[in-house]
Image (tube, rainbow, N blue to C red):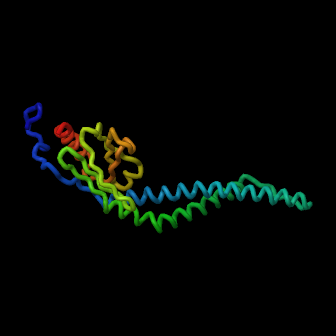
Amino acid sequence: MQDRGGVKNNYDTLPESFPIEIDRERLRRFLRLHCLIGWMVITGFFGFFAGIGTIGDAIKANELREKEGRQAVILSHATILRHLANGMAMGGSIGLVFYLCMGQWTSAAYARNIRLSVEGAFLRVQSGVFLRQDRKIHFRSIHDYAVVETYFSRLTGVQVLRMNVSGSMQRPWLHIAGIKDCLEVRDMLAEVDARRENA
């Protein structure tokens, strides 16, 4: 088959089914960074509120001192910030422990288990750690392909292929990170999509 310019397209020779290569080492680093930041933010958030609670305890202690006729301690801005910082540091430390206990292993397992392949008129995605999912998406359900880079993905040299999938009870956007030569794969999938969506 030839394109409009009369030049044979490289995608004409693709087999009916073939895998798409994942850069698992970079994907593992990307997932670990995301996991670390996620745990630190979540537990740091709760630690922030724990710090607010310690400020409340300090205020109550001051009120008790006043009732007993003792001199109250003035809570300065520096003291309040110290309470908040201590709470966030405590929460962040808990997040680090969770990451070391779970995050490193789950990130490596996810990067090891993910598979992406073309099977005729379907795109097959296999992923998951605790809950494994094997999903086949017909090309006619995929409306566009985009390559996305975030600050953290650039740090680890990873690009994310984002696809808009219709007719799904799940989220309409499907994200696959860590594909080797992601821009070329995007163009290849768009071409395969155009040729096979009515199959």
User: With respect to residue 118, does 39 lie above or below?
Assistant: below
Residue 109 x %, y %: 36, 64
The mark tally for this picture is 0
Q: What's the residue at 8%, 36% (across, down)?
A: 2
Instruction: Name the image quarter holding the C terminus.
Output: top left
User: With respect to residue 60, does 147 lie above or below?
Assistant: above
Residue 76 x %, y %: 75, 53
Determine the image quadrant of residue 85.
bottom right
Q: Is residue 142 visible?
A: yes
Determine the image quadrant of residue 130.
bottom left
Residue 80 x %, y %: 71, 55
Q: Is residue 28 visible?
A: no
Q: What's the residue at 35%, 60% (across, down)?
A: 110
Q: What's the residue at 28%, 52% (across, down)?
A: 125
Going by the image, does 12 lie left or right of 144? left
Going by the image, does 97 lie left or right of 76? left
Frontmost residue, 66 versus 138:
138
Instruction: Name the image quarter holding the N terminus.
Output: top left
